[in-house]
Amino acid sequence: MALTDIRDVPTSSNERVSLDIFERALDQALALKGNPVATIDEALAAEPGFVIGRCFRAQLQLLSMERALLGQAAREVELAETLTGAANRRERGHIAAARAWLNGDLERAVEHWEEVLIDYPRDLLAFYAAHLTDFYLGDSMQLRDRAARALRAWDGDTPGYGYALGMYAFGLEEMGDYVRAEAMARQAVEINPRDVYAIHSVAHVMEMQGRQRDGIQWMSERQADWLPADGFRIHLWWHLALYHLDLGEIDRVLEIYDQGIRNKKSEISLEELDAAAMLWRLSLAGIDVSERWGGLADKWEPHAEDTLYAFNDMHAMMTFAGDRRDMAAARLLGAAASYVTERGGTNATMTRDVGLPVCRAFLAFSRGDYETAVDLLTRIHARRFGFGGSYAQRDVINLTLIEAAIRCKRYNLAQALLAERLALKPTSAHAWRSMARVLDGMGDRREARAALARADEIADQ
């Protein structure tokens, strides 16, 4: 007789041991700790026809967004499809979602998971997979609303409730509902103090609100809880560094980069996104990080043509531009352009509309061609939200546009963008210092001094 999982969601399995192992692997994935692939392999070894376990393994490979795992992901999807006849309706939805993702249609994949969630709102695997896909799509509204729709069937007694709250909190934050987002994330942390994703949701709120000192305190007080999260630790170091960077505390940022963000492993991983983004932000702030680019670029260069996700390509370009690796940059641009013309699907659209212009702009910026950088970035300024990642991560595009505008003396544009920024985050010492540079360039010495004084006041608080 087929069993349900611990949230009473139906499966086609009649092996409780397999389902118990599945829950352990799912918890590892949501906790961003351990090796969920190895764990789910235990279940598949015990029950080769374990449909939802096979679906989960395929999704883990696909959601990693790593080209090196695509071959494995394809085999997993094919194996899952061989089990379609034994699968129930919910599991067939997971199989269809995995196939759509493999085919490059992330929008269709998330539609399949949504169909599953409408009928089985406590399907935590579908919740998790759809949430990550919405993040990759940069779909802030669905990050919030898909979670809200599913949570109608959850309460405090539902296993995994804290994880669901943490994901909902992140969606609320991305939609600018900061008060509710923080309350929801803190509730999740109360349920599980080591819920690093919920800790991260609070960090995002404080970043967006310009609560740098609160953010530093939050991350420091919870450090013992997030340091063990090997799958997310570097990203949380990145968040801590952002607060210090906004305050102009460069020595502390460099210390965090060297001790926390810089990944000492030789192979490329998603952690290199955070390293590239932090070095690029430091370089925008006028900090010489030239000796730090080389090791990072060494990791990215063998993957210059691995176009799979435009958001990752942007970070690869940061390293090539930062380390003056023109050949690697050219290979990346060529591969991305070929992807657009030869492939369909979600990433081709993202690359065409945002990824290629951003990569070209960053390369132009590194060469001192600030006019070209400004022209390229202003064209995609309103489209950057459909590019994947979070507001905090995409902010590097806006920061680059502002700095390029200042350097090519397009002061009216820089002033307008900084006014927009300071309206949302008046506590940014970095933004006030940039505004002082703009005002000085425009000849308004008195207002420039006032802006600089405001920056110093914030930094000294």
Image (cartoon, rainbow, N blue to C red):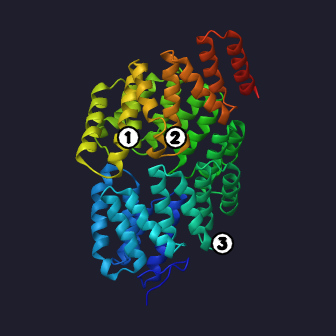
Regarding residue 115, the answer to whether it shows in the image is yes
Give me the C-alpha separation between circle 3 and circle 1. Answer: 41 Å
Give me the C-alpha separation between circle 1 and circle 2. Answer: 18 Å
Quarter where residue 302 is shown: top left
Report the front residue among 328 and 130.
130
Report the front residue among 329 and 112.
112
**Label drawn at residue 393:** 2
N-terminal-most mark, 3 or 1: 3
Three-letter amino acid code at the position of disc 2:
Gln
Badge nearest the viewer, 1 or 2: 1
N-terminal-most mark, 1 or 2: 1
Regarding residue 309, the answer to whether it shows in the image is no
Q: Residues within 10 Å of mark 1 (few under 14, many from 20)?
A: some
Where does label 3 land, which residue? 155
Could you tell me how many numbered marks the image carries?
A: 3
Identify whether 117 is placed above or below 88: above
Three-letter amino acid code at the position of disc 1:
Asp
Where does label 1 land, which residue? 353
Identify whether 235 is placed above or below 247: below
Q: Residues within 10 Å of mark 2 (few under 14, many from 20)?
A: some
Could you say whether the residue bearing mark 2 is in a helix, strand or loop?
helix
